[in-house]
Amino acid sequence: MKVLWLTPVQLPAVEKRVAPTVFRGGGWLESLRAALCAEGSLQLGMAAAGETPFEPFDEGGVQYFHVQAPPRPRSGLAGVVAGWRHRADEASLLAGATSVIEQFQPDLIHVHGSEGPFGVLVTTTTKPVIISLQGILLVYSRAFFSGVPVVDVMRSAVSLECAKGRGLLHDYAYMRVAAQRELNVLRACHYFAGRTDWDRGIVSVVNPHAHYYHVEEVLRPEFYLPDWRQSSGGTFVVYTTLGPAPYKGLINLLEAVALLRESALPDMRLRVAGRIQGSAMWPITQRALDRWRLHGAVDWLGSLAPAEIALELGGASVYVHPSIVENSPNSLAEAMILGVPCVAASAGGVPSLLKDGHEGLLCSPNDVYGLAAAIGAVAADPVRAARLGTNARVRARRRHDPRTIAQAMIATYETVVSDHDARSP
């Protein structure tokens, strides 16, 4: 069977050719590709949008194709106009993807993520298309500014960055446009792959006649080897991996840390990985650090490689995921599979990953005091915390077994093609 992947990022085989100095590793997509290739029953093609063109090539039995990303001015008047338009040049991307489909002639097209423009292909191609559900903008956009003080939203609206077509308000406007496109795609697609009760429920409401298949994600290999070991004494360390979107709950986490430092854990430290510095959230974050006198208590780690994240998790007392809206965060799964005690907001699909009180502790989304209480409970009872981590590790290793996932994905592909053939005249 020939399966064409359309992905939101370029995978390592391409990155090594066109941008070796900014190699990112491909994340869980590369892990799933490797697991599928190990089964040996598929002929895979890969395509993603990129600025640097290349000729199609074969590596490891996988064919890689280029889809030209439309140029977007980033400076001058043209950059300002582009920032205020709040739309991407979808036509050229879809034309490029259609050309790849004609070259590769797949039996099935797998679009990774409903957020991007490639999902629109369900309305233009006669090939069967399955969409993997990642973040769902339809819901994310409704919670975009959650957890950010209103005064900070207002400051962003009157800032020079906003006038230049950059910043949070423009990110929100673009997401609203993309969410409408996504809604149309969700209504038109027949086949979806997901991992949580939350994303299954959204599909059942938006498109009750669609077929939904539960397929887990393969994590990056660095997280299958080490086990977390509880440190004896020392500083209580909170670790998190967060993106720069306001709904990821960073400001809530900072306030929760401030509350605990004022009471039960005066010496605790917070270590944050992710592209926060330099983002639209950084000025808001700086004001929060000033407000709660946290400048000396937080370490900003930037983007980390998988091995570096595993090392950070190994030295943490607790992993915290404060996101206010979420589907299936890989960062939480990575902490669980290592056996790190976890605290998370029970947003979206998170309760499908972690059972409260048995594999970690959950609190209500956007509940600063509940978040602080859960972190404090981990610190107050190390024996229970270790037991929660052990239970999480057992479940995560079973859930993220690469071969089981690869076989489930292949079975899903076969079922979709068979059903599509039965539907077709």
Image: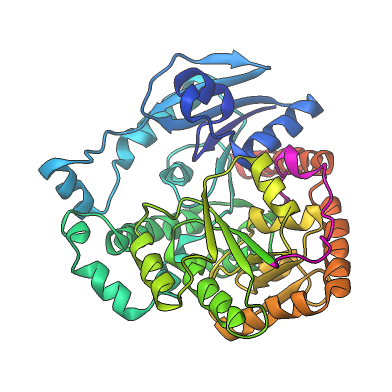
State left or right for residue 411 relative to residue 114. Answer: right
**Type of secondary structure dominating the magenta stretch:** loop
Q: Is residue 234 magenta?
A: yes
- Residues 172 and 212: in front is 172
> Residue 66's image quarter?
top left
Q: Name the spot of residue 356 as percent of width and height, x first.
A: 77, 76
Q: Is residue 113 above or below residue 379?
A: above
What segment is highlighted magenta in the picture?
215-236
Q: Residue at x 43, y 16 (%)?
A: 54
Q: Residue at x 16, y 59 (%)?
A: 163
Residue 139 in sight:
no
Q: Name the spot of residue 9 as percent of width and height, x first.
A: 50, 37
Residue 390 in sight:
yes
> Residue 106's image quarter?
top right
- Where is the N terminus found, in terms of image quarters? top right
> Residue 195's image quarter?
bottom right
State left or right for residue 177 relative to residue 189. Answer: left
Q: Residue at x 49, y 22 (%)?
A: 20
- Residues 138 and 74: in front is 74
State left or right for residue 412 relative to residue 156. Answer: right
Q: How many marks?
A: 0
